[in-house]
Amino acid sequence: MNAHPHQSGERLAVVHNGIIENHEALRRELEAEGYAFTSETDTEVVAHLLERESRQAGDLLTAVQRVLARLDGAYALGVIHAGEPDVVIGARKGSPLVVGVGIGEAFLGSDPLALLQVTDRFIYLEEGDAVRLSAGGRIEVFDAEGAAVEREVQTFEHGDGAASKGDYRHFMLKEIHEQPAVIAAALEGRLGDRSALVESFGPEAEALFRQARQIHIVACGTSYHAGMVARYWLERYAGIPVQVEVASEYRYRQVVVPEGTLFVTLSQSGETADTLAALRFARTGGYLASLAICNVPGSSLVRESDLSLMTQAGPEIGVASTKAFTTQLTALMLLTLALGRVRGLDEAVQAEVVTALRGLPRLVERVLELDPAIEALSMAFVEKHHALFLGRGAHFPIALEGALKLKEISYIHAEAYPAGELKHGPLALVDSDMPVISVAPNDELLDKLKSNLQEVRARGGELFVFADEGWG
Ligand code: BG6
C-alpha cells in the first residue's frame, strides 16, 4: 500500500488507501472529545476513531468492525495496536486489498504485485471484508456482517518476472518496450482470417451485440482517453452512436439511457472507485448489458460486469499508463470489429482491419526503434515550462494522452486541443517558448492539420510532428 501510516497516541497505527467522505463530521466529533489532530487527512480521523473504539471493544478486530460501520466512502485499511502485537487487521470497501499467503506468515497489500517477491498465493478480499492476520500465518476473514467466511486462495498467474525491472532503468521504460508482445497477446485467439471472433467477449456477446443500439463508455484518466479514441472507430466502422464520459462526472449525473444501450467500462486495474461506482449505478439504470475491458482478471469491475474482455497487458507497475493504454486500444478495435460484424460492416473492410491489426506489433517495434531519436528530441523540453499538444479526429484524444503523460512524468504543464480549435484562443499562447507537439498520420485530415500547424509556425512556435514517412 503506497500510504503514510498515521498514529493515534503511541499504541495504534493505520495505513489507508481511498477516501473517507464523512471525515469532517467525524473529525468534529473527535475534536469535541479532546482528540488533537496533527494533519488534515481523513486517515488520521480513522486512527483516532480506532483508538477510541479499541479502548471499549475487547479486541482490535471488533474495534475495526465497529469503526467500519461509521465510515462512508472507499477504503482499504491496515491496522496494528501495541495491545495485540502479533495481529494485523485489514479491511476493504471500494479499494482493493489482498492477503498474501506465505508459509507460516501472511501479508497485506493493495496489489498482489507488491507482494510477488514473498508469495504468489493470494486471497482477494471482497467488498466489506475484514481480515485478521496473526502470528504463525493464521488468516481469518470476516464478511460485511462480521461472519467468519472462507475465501479462495488463488495462485498469481504472472509469476514470470513481471515484477522485476530486468535490464531497464525503470518499470515505465520496460513496459513501453513490452508493447509489441502484449499487443500480440491482446489479439491472440480473438481474430479469424477475415473478421473478429465475437465470442471473445463471452458466450452471450453475439446476441447482446445484435440488440445494441448505442454505447455509453465510462472510464477515468488514460482509460478515458482510450474510450474517446474508440468513439471515432465505433461510429465509423460499426455505425453505432457512442457517448464517452469520465466516471466521476457520469456517476453524479441524471443519465438518460435510451433502450438498447450497452454500458462499457475501461480500466487497467478494474478497481478505480469512480468507474466501479458508475458500473454499480448503471446496473440499476436500464442498460442492455455491461461490458468491462480490463487488465486485471478477477478485479471487481470484471466480476460485476455481464461481459468482459481482458487486455492481456500483464502487470503494469509504472504509475503512468503505457502498455495498458495501447492494449486497451487494441481491445477496443476488436470490439469495433465485433460490433461491425454483427451490424453488417463490409467484409472487405473487416478483412483489411484484421490484416492491419496483425501487423500492429511489428509496427510498434519499428516505432520503438526510434527511441534514441526521441530521447534527443526530449532535450528541447528540458528548460520549458509549458507544452501544447494538437491532434484531429481520433488523434485528438491521443494528443490529450500525450499531454497527460508529459504532466505526470516531467511536471511540465501541458494542454491538448483539437487542432481546429487552435484559432479560437490557444494560438495566442504560442511563441518560441511553447513547444507544440502533434501526431499527423497520413489520413484524410492531414491537409487540415498541416494548415493548423502553419499557424503555429507563423507565430514562431517550435513544432514536433510525429508523421508517417513522406510527410512534406
Ligand atoms: C489514475 C492513474 O490514478 O487512474 C492513471 O494515474 C489511470 O494512469 C487512471 O489511467 C484510471 O485507472 P484505471 O485502472 O481505471 O485504468
Image (cartoon, rainbow, N blue to C red):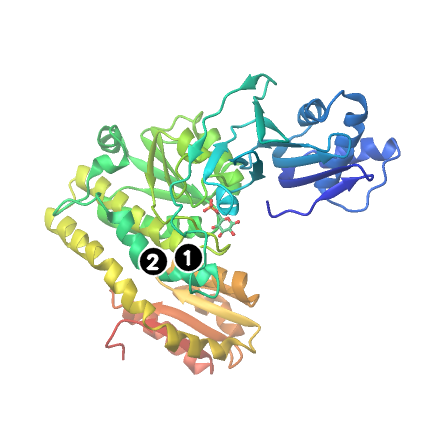
Task: Identify the residue at image location x=30%, y=58%.
Answer: 180
Does 47 sit left or right of 18 as displayed? right
* Quarter of image, res 78: top right
Figure label count = 2
**The quarter of the displayed image where residue 466 is located:** bottom left
Mark 2 nearby-residue class (10 Å; few <14, some 14–19, many ≥20): many
Q: Distance between the residues labelled 2 and 1?
A: 8 Å
Q: Which residue position holds label 1? A: 322
The crowd level at tag 1 (other Cα within 10 Å; few <14, some 14-19, many 20+) is many
Give x and y (percent) for residue 387. 51, 70
Quadrant into which the N terminus falls: top right
Looking at this view, is 188 or 439 the one in front? 188
Q: What residue type is labelled 1?
A: Thr
Q: In percent of the image, x 52 and y 35: which residue is there? A: 103
Question: Which sits in the foreground, 170 or 204?
Answer: 170
Q: Residue 276 location in percent, x, y?
A: 48, 35
- Which numbered dot is residue 33? none
User: Could you tell me which quadrant the C terminus lies in?
Assistant: bottom left
Residue 152 seen anywhere in this rendered image of the structure: yes
Looking at the picture, tell me which residue is in the foreground, 217 or 36: 36
Q: Considering only vertical position in the picture, is 469 above or below 404? A: below
Mark 2 element type: helix
> What is the three-letter code of the residue carrying label 2?
Gln
Could you tell me if the residues under marks 2 and 1 are in contact, i.e. CB atoms within 8 Å?
Answer: yes
Q: Identify the secondary structure beneath mark 1.
A: loop
Closer to viewer: mark 2 or mark 1? 2
Whether the residue carrying mark 2 lies under 8 Å from ligand 1 is answered with no
Q: Can residue 129 be seen from the camera position used here?
A: no
Q: Where is residue 362 in the image (x, y as percent from the top left)?
A: 24, 62
Residue 431 vs 31, above or below: the answer is below
Q: Mark 2 points at which residue?
A: 179
Residue at coordinates 43% horizontally, 27% vertically from top-left?
Answer: 283
